[in-house]
Image (spheres, rainbow, N blue to C red):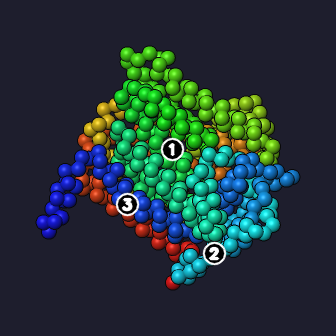
Amino acid sequence: MSAFQPITDRVRELRPDLVPRRAFLLLAPFLYAAYALLTPAFQNFDENQHLYRAWQISTSQLVGERRGARSGGELPPGLARATVQEIGSITPQTARRTVRRPVSQMFGWNTPIGTAEKPIYYDFFGAVVYAPVGYLPQILAVRIGVAAGLSVEWTLRLGRLSNVALCLGLVLWALKLIPYGRWPMAIIALSPPMAAAAASFGQDALVGGSGFLLTALGLRIAAERRWTGARATTVGLATLAVSLAKFVYLPLVAVAVFPLPRAVSLRRWFTPPLLIGAAAAFLVYAWIRINAPALVPSFRPWVPTMPEQVSWAAAHPLEFTALIGRTFLFELPTLWARFYTFGDSTVPTIWAAAIPGTAALLVAMAYGERNALDLTRGRRLWILLTFGAVALLIAFAMFLTLAARGAIVIEGIQARYFLPVLPLGAIGLMRRGEDAPRGVMTVTIALVLAAHAATLGTIAATFYSV
């Protein structure tokens, strides 16, 4: 017993602001890796399209190739064989097949890549739009997989684990920088939706981790009333990465802007975020122009083209505003539960996970932090306005691509789109007060682990048999 006494004493003496980061560092690597390995290949959201796009970029084809109403590129045939074996089709935006196999065969399917065979054309219009910067970990995994002769499935898993490593690093950085709100951010970072998103082959690891980092650094800059060269560089790189991956998160560059600090000139305070935001917007615009020839005008015949959608919204502002309002009135009541939908919508809402997972976040928000003196009404208002700006851009992006003329609501808004800004919204609504007692922290961790147990158990039961 005496050998463990120093460790026990150190844990008891640990500062409350260090507990969330230590808890994340202790638990997250195992939880994230569990989702990366347990979920079968191609069973995350649009995972086959992301694999095709990353594979295309890894061969130095930065822009896709359009052929009629299809947009994609030529890739090894092994990718198609692996995809059809797992989900039934390589056709984008089709229903996913769910194949149950014995748990002993979890890693039993290993499809050769077929690099020596003649490549075939793949249609992955949903991923061709994305810039290469969003796929850096996956590109590295593809290159390693090809060089090492790995199967398609293990190359995909390697890409997932690379994403896990990236997300873990970004979130740990954010938890170190954030001046207050560590516990709500840590609970969100430890939640099943965040773990599953980071452990997919798509861009959610980069976008989610960068969203957390921009939130943390923006709040620190605002709390200390000071920009530095290093901070501006970090915010700039994170903003460029997240905007080129998903432009809807560009407003996160403005977390630190308001309320204005005293004794600091407006020009000095506004210059960094304005320059960073302008540069990010320009690069997004430049990529859209460069990539435009590879894109199909509309992948749903009943949806107008993007220019037509923009023209309609500009000509009918009241109708467009009403459409946005109806959409959020319809979506908000069930949005919290839809965070707990997994697979490529093949694992429906897991209520046994949604209830304890949501309760853990609410408990973390109900207890304050003594460091949150800067969380004034003005700061809360600006935080929530920034969150609202991202939400409106998410709705606008879905309107451009999915809303038929005369639609009652905008379809296609998924709860996972809000994960990168969820810590910001939680901090804007959290209570300001004393730090949560250790007992409360223990309860929130127990609730999160219960949510993971339900989620991983359901995923296992969906895809595997004894």
Q: How crowded is the residue under tag 1: few (<14 C-alpha within 10 Å), some, or many (20+)?
A: many
Q: Could you tell me the amino acid type at mark 3?
A: Leu
Mark 1, mark 2: which one is toward the viewer? 2
In percent of width and height, residue 145 lies at 62, 64
Q: Are marks 1 and 2 in contact (CB under 8 Å)?
A: no
| Amino acid, disc 2 | Asn
The amino acid type, in three-letter code, at marker 1 is Ser
- Residue drawn at point x = 40 percent, y = 29 percent: 222
Within the image, what quadrant is residue 277 found in? top right
Task: Give whichever of discs 3 and 1 has the lower sequence position.
Answer: 3
198 or 53: nearer the eye? 53
Q: Give the class, few, some or many, for how many residues have Cα within 10 Å of label 3's Cα (few <14, many ≥20).
A: few
Between residues 96 and 432, which one lies in front from this camera angle?
96
Q: 47 and 355: which one is in front?
A: 47
Q: Where residue 111 sits: x, y (%)?
A: 67, 74
Would you say 40 lies left or right of 303 here?
left
Residue 210: mark in rendering:
1
Whether residue 310 is visible here, answered yes or no, is yes
User: Which residue is labeled 2 in the image?
Assistant: 110
Work out whether mark 2 precedes mark 3 in sequence or the reverse, and give the earlier one.
3
The image quadrant of residue 190 is bottom left
Q: Which residue is mark 3?
A: 27
Estimate the x, y position of residue 401 in percent, counting from the top left. Answer: 72, 46
